[in-house]
Amino acid sequence: MPCVDDEGTGLDEHGGGFDETGEPTAQVSCPYCGAWVELILDPGGAALQEYVEDCEICCQPWHLTVSWDGEGNASVEARTEDG
């Protein structure tokens, strides 16, 4: 599952995939501390999803944008709240 980080860099090599329950996941780099965090994605939501989630390492709030294409692939963007 292709995704992008806060700078639009492709993350295919860092994986997207599925967790043990079969939920789609994406690896995203925190725009504050740079830690890689695995997110569980919601393919049943809208084609464009925007929400705030805290980094599980540094606890800073990210503004996340997840967009799904017609083939079920997700793109994920993580930005600082002011960015």
Image (cartoon, helix red, strand yellow):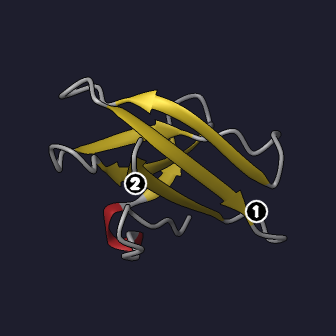
Q: Is residue 65 left or right of residue 44?
A: left
Query: Mark 2: few, some, or many residues within 10 Å (few <14, many ≥20)?
Result: few
Residue type indicated by callout 2: Gly
Q: Is residue 4 left or right of residue 45?
A: left
Image height of 43 relative to 19, above or below: below
Q: Which mark is residue 9?
A: none
The residue beneath circle 1 is 72
Q: Which mark is residue 83?
A: 2
Q: Quarter of the image containing the N terminus?
A: bottom right
Q: Nearer the viewer, mark 1 or mark 2?
A: 2
Q: Residue at position x 45%, y 67% from top?
A: 4
Q: Is residue 42 left or right of residue 57?
A: right
Residue 25 placement (x, y as % from top left):
52, 45
Which comes before the other along the chain, label 1 or label 2? 1
- Choose between 55 and 27: the one closer to the eye: 55
SS at mark 2? loop
Image height of 40 relative to 10, above or below: above
Residue 21 position by quadrant: top right
Q: Residue at position x 31%, y 41% from top?
A: 37
Residue 75 placement (x, y as % from top left):
58, 64
Q: Residue at position x 21%, y 45% from top?
A: 32
Q: Are marks 1 and 2 in contact (CB under 8 Å)?
A: no
